[in-house]
Image (cartoon, grey):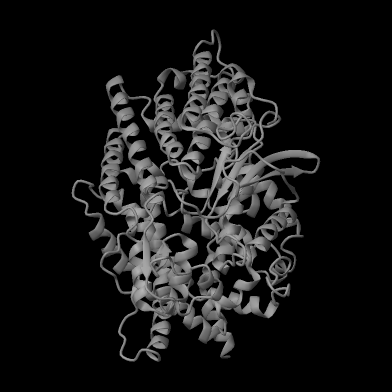
Amino acid sequence: MAAPVSDTASSLDVHPWNPAGTGSVDAKALESWVEERLLRHRRGIERLLAVDGPRSLENTLRTYDDAVAELSAVGSLTGLMHSVYPDKPVRDTAQALLQKISQAGVELSLNREVYQALDRIDARSEADAATRHYLDRTLLQYRLAGVDKDDATRARIKELQDRATLTSLQFAQNVQEGGNTVAIDSAAELDGLPPDYLEMHQPGEDGKITLTTDFPDYLPVMTFARSGDLRRKMFLAYNTRAWPANRQLLLDLLNIRQEVATILGFAHWADLATVDQMIESAANMQAFLDDLDHASKAGAEKEYSMILEFVRTHEPGLNQIDAASRAYWVEQYRRSAFDFDSQSVRPYFPYARVEPGVLATAEKLFQVRFRRIENPDVWHPAVSAWEVWDGTELAGRFYLDMHPREGKDKWFSAHPLIPGIRDRQLPEAALICNFPEPKEGNPGLLQYSDVVTFFHEFGHLMHALLGGRQAWAGISGIATEGDFVEVPSQMLEEFFRDPRLLASFAHHFETGERIPAELVMRMNRAGAFGRADWVRSQLFYTTYSLETHRLDPATLDPDTLFRGLYERFLPYAWIDGNHMYASFTHLVGYSSNYYTYLYDKVIALDFFAQFPRHALLDSPAAMRYRKTVLEPGGSMPGKEIVQKFLGRSQSSDAFTQWIGEEFQQMSAAYA
């Protein structure tokens, strides 16, 4: 680690999985590690409150920020253990400790003496803009937490927030550890799957082949399996994870959030959750969604009619495609209409080439170097550790935990670990993913959507690290408004479409041949088809997250709402037994604000439009993007970041063009 931040952050030179340099930890050691860090946090707050005399940035905000840095790191690192540690007793202990860490955070957010100390800081006008933004935003968040309420009300808020944390943790753990399986009797049922998939799924001693709902098993079946019966079984297995347990947990969480919102003077949680975001209110969110609903409806209907017409040439008399067959028939249509079989690019994406390819792309784009740490002390042998060098300066560290295993979080995410503080503490972050793992006799081939996901998550990682050199931990890294968080990740996705960039690392796993530019162009044309449908899918998830947090939870039926919104936004036939919301962990994290993905896609495409297509990695736009978008971290409002990079407010022009690209291509083809 870099030089520690006084006594408060000196604890961060040891990770929870590395108390003795062994790369492992047991439940008791983890508990001791967390208790020591929480003690340091409490001592920091005590020092803050003990200040005698005028309040200054140094004796008050610095002391507060050091305590926040301690709490942030212990929470993130313990959360990582909960998500990825191989031993269940450690994961269970981490869950209990996260509840305790959250309690400390709630106590801090409701501590009126701390709020008053921050509010009394003198010479605020002499501070730089980033410091003023940090202080103003911190005071706003205190008020939104209820710090100005009476003692009894603050006690009730604390009780509710503690319950919300426990409920959220249990919801997430049920998803993490609640995967399902599908057993099939014969390899014939896997007809259509690629050879490497068949090789990795051999019959067990009972003669059956077992498929899991982990993404490397699930996604290929839904995309390539000719058996409609198998696709349906996998669909229901995947969309019943953590159900029915999480149905009641969701209702419990919604009731808690509604009571908190009511206490704080808001009509519903969605109003509270948006008041400090770029979008500013739930009403503005709804207006944004209504605009996208109108803009995408005709295009999505046209896409569906084209696919249905195609399917009827194979299955005459079919009136509707069901939800389990959606990905399969889209794939088949793309093969016919665009002469593109997505299996044709998989041989060019063995994991062993994709990882260094993504890293090399980021190195060139952001003008940094990554150095792999040999024999690192990490939580699992499959994890790699890396240093980030900016010229001659060590700028941060990151970890890659990229393949599924029992008990590990099943999704894909970037996980900030330690907030950087300029000249005092290095930022650290991790990628937690579930890509196919290379094994003897199997190269771990990725689908092109997997590679896009890799680019996406690496965009988050670079934001966390390059934005992690602020003067204050509280505005370091991914500390922007919640509805700016997805901009850097979705912007980096767009680089995947460049043939020259892909040719730099996408080499056939057997022949070494570079991916042909013509194949990439066909992939791009095929990939453009279905964008309106993607927007409709996002509207479905977004509206569900909004409505669950806007309707009265006392009368809400999450299943009825889920089906009703599905049938409103999507044309594919509903399948009874679909309880996907029970594993929709964004309901816990983003709560009502899942709109972020659509909102940030508009900004991301506007940003990407500033990069010249002939020189994506080499143009001045790349360093300007790094300097004005990533490096500020959370030191200024998101709207100001947009203004600085674009020289204007955001526009939806690039997004509109992106949605319509598929039909523009078709018109050109038949001109």
Residue at 62% x, 45% y: name it: 399
384 or 606, which lies in front? Answer: 384
Residue 3: quadrant of the picture: top right
Q: Nearer the viewer, residue 375 or 57?
A: 375
Q: Considering the image in quadrants, where does the N terminus appear?
A: top right
Residue 21, given in percent of the width and then of the height, sits at 64, 32
Q: Residue at x 55, y 15 (%)?
A: 55
Residue pushed farthest right? Answer: 392
In the image, residue 150 above or below residue 145: above
Q: Is residue 374 visible?
A: yes
Report the residue that reaches farthest toward the front.
Answer: 205
Side of 575 relative to 642 (left or right): left
Residue 430 on image: x %, y %:
58, 45
Instruction: Answer with the quarter of the image where residue 425 lies.
Output: top right
> Which residue in the rendered view is the most extreme toward the top?
52
Residue 283 percent coordinates (x, y): 36, 51
Q: Viewer-proximal residue, 228 or 117?
A: 228
Where is residue 208 drawn, in percent x and y?
A: 39, 69
